[in-house]
């Protein structure tokens, strides 16, 4: 299934009717309010919570975030489509992000991206037919001293060579975090974010 990482030309539609934000997600977003002087300032963590919960941020979800924060939906849309780390379409169970900024580019990120494309059989912005992986690029992943860098979900991999790609893809723990994440976004559903279903699936 092909999907755009960022598509500023086409309107975001809700034809696939993703789930609405749960009460838990809304409560988590509201819990951020006391940290900031305005509700608007809680937008970025709120969007992370939504993405962690649903796997991506649909137009309908943006609208609901706007309601919770009491800001125009257009502001939420502007922010979601500005940052490449927010997704507006369903993605695979795991998302591979190859850094495309200058240090990684100089250290071979372009060749590395081609290796991922070849082994996954998909292009940038696409998902494998089995839904296992989506492939994308983003700007600096803040690990320039380990260039070229790759993220698999939230796990960073540094100094990745094209020859490493088959073993990396075969490793079932390639997205497993060694250091627990901050509890800023994780406790929404009371489970490990690395095992949470993606693509809008919800546990019954
Ligand atoms: S340029 Fe790739 S991590 Fe900074």
Image (cartoon, rainbow, N blue to C red):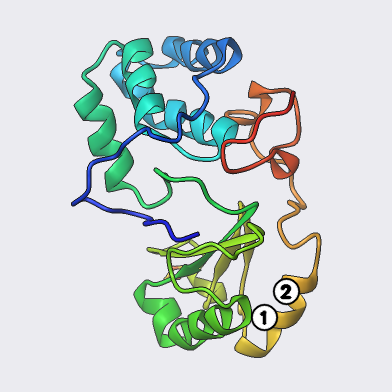
Q: Are marks 1 and 2 in contact (CB under 8 Å)?
A: yes
Residue at 76% from the left image edge and 53% from the top image edge: 176
Q: Residue at x 50, y 13 (%)?
A: 26
Residue 118 in percent (x, y) is at 57, 84
Q: How many tags in the picture?
A: 2
Q: Of helix, strand and loop, which one carries label 1?
A: helix
Q: Quadrant of residue 80?
A: top left
Q: Nearer the viewer, residue 159 or 24?
A: 24
Left or right of 136, for residue 156: right
Residue for point 72% across, 72% down: 169
Name the residue tied to disc 1: 165
Badge number at residue 58? none
Q: Position of residue 84 (x, y in %)?
A: 37, 52
- In the image: residue 151, left or right of residue 75: right
Up-down relation of residue 8 to residue 148 (above or below)? above
Q: Residue at x 43, y 63 (%)?
A: 125
Q: Nearer the viewer, residue 89 or 110?
A: 89
Lateral position of residue 9 relative to residue 196, left or right: left
- Real-space Cα distance between discs 1 and 2? 5 Å
Q: Dot 2: what SS?
A: helix
Q: Quadrant of the C terminus?
A: top right
Q: Residues within 10 Å of mark 1 (few under 14, many from 20)?
A: some
The residue tagged 2 is 168
């Amino acid at each position: 299934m092909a999907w755009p990482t960022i598509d500023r030309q086409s309107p975001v539609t809700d034809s696939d009717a993703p789930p609405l934000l749960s009460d838990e997600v809304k409560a988590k977003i509201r819990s951020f309010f006391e940290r900031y002087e305005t509700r608007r300032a809680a937008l970025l963590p709120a969007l992370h919570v939504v993405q962690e919960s649903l796997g991506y941020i649909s137009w309908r979800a943006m609208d609901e975030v706007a309601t919770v924060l009491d800001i125009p939906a257009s502001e939420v849309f502007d922010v979601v489509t500005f940052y490449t780390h927010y997704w507006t379409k369903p993605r695979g169970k795991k998302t591979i992000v190859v850094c495309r900024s200058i240090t990684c580019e100089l250290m071979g990120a372009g060749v590395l991206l081609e290796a991922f494309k070849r082994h996954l059989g998909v292009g940038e912005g696409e998902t494998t037919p089995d839904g296992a992986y989506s492939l994308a690029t983003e700007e600096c992943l803040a690990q320039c001293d380990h260039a070229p860098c790759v993220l698999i979900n939230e796990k960073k991999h540094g100094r990745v060579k094209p020859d490493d790609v088959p073993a990396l893809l075969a490793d079932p723990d390639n997205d497993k975090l060694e250091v627990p994440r901050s509890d800023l976004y994780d406790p929404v559903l009371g489970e490990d974010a690395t095992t949470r279903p993606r693509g809008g699936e919800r546990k019954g």
